[in-house]
Image (cartoon, helix red, strand yellow):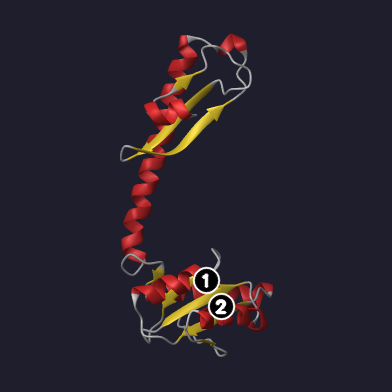
Amino acid sequence: MNEVVQSKEIVFNTALTPEEAMFGAPLLRQGEIFAVILCYQVPFQNLTLSYRNLIDVMTRLINSSLDRSFGYIDAVQLDRYVGNTNALKQDYFERIVIQKEQAKVELNIPYTLLHIRESLTDTVLHSVDATLRTTDYLGYRDDNELYALLSNATMDESQIVIERLAQKSIHAEVVEDVSYVE
């Protein structure tokens, strides 16, 4: 693995050391390694130059596909999120609120909407975002106020998040009557 990271190239275990991977291949984005493919079990009869070429081609295909995916994510990031934050713009956040309300009605899956009552600064946005789970959402509604949508959380469970935010001097309250526009 160290050799792959240092060389940024595919490295094969030519010594056939059993406790080491048979090969390691780096996945690069903008010249930096973001992942490494390691393969530990390769039948001996496959260890040919043709196999090495196949690994090289497959690694390039995987890398190209992931690079395009990351490019798409970067492009969508500018469209969906406010600045360099994880706060969704109004249209995208409202879509999620509608989906959560439908899931609540049809499947009885709870959610809670919190209104963040603070003057919005980057520090507040990052503090709120750091307090939320990866399944929760942060975003703006039509009143240009910041909200946090807590997935799979009842009003009682949302009190934990409200208390954590209060420890950071951020005031939040549950929105009991969630109105949305379809």
Question: Against 102, is 177 above or below?
Answer: below
At x 31% / y 37%, what residue is drawn? 31
**Front-lying residue, 139 or 36:** 36
Measuring from the top left, give residue 127's x and y in whole percent.
Answer: 45, 73
Q: Which mark is residue 164?
A: 2
- At label 2, the amino acid type is Arg
Q: Quadrant of residue 4?
A: top left
**Front-lying residue, 161 or 176:** 161
Measuring from the top left, give residue 114's x and y in whole percent.
Answer: 52, 82
At x 48% / y 68%, what residue is drawn? 130
Q: Quadrant of residue 100?
A: bottom right
Mark toward the start of the polypeptide (1 vs 2): 1
Gap in Å between the C-alphas at discs 1 and 2? Answer: 7 Å
Question: Against 32, is 156 above or below?
Answer: below
- Tell me the SS state at disc 1: helix
- Tell whether label 2 touches label 1 (CB within 8 Å): yes
Measuring from the top left, give residue 118's x and y in whole percent.
Answer: 41, 86
| Residue under pointer 1 | 131
At x 58% / y 22%, what residue is drawn? 20
Q: Quadrant of residue 162?
A: bottom right
- At label 1, the amino acid type is Thr
* Outermost residue to the bottom: 177
Crowd rating for badge 1 (residues with CA inside 10 Å; few <14, some 14–19, many 20+)? some
**Front-lying residue, 33 or 61:** 33
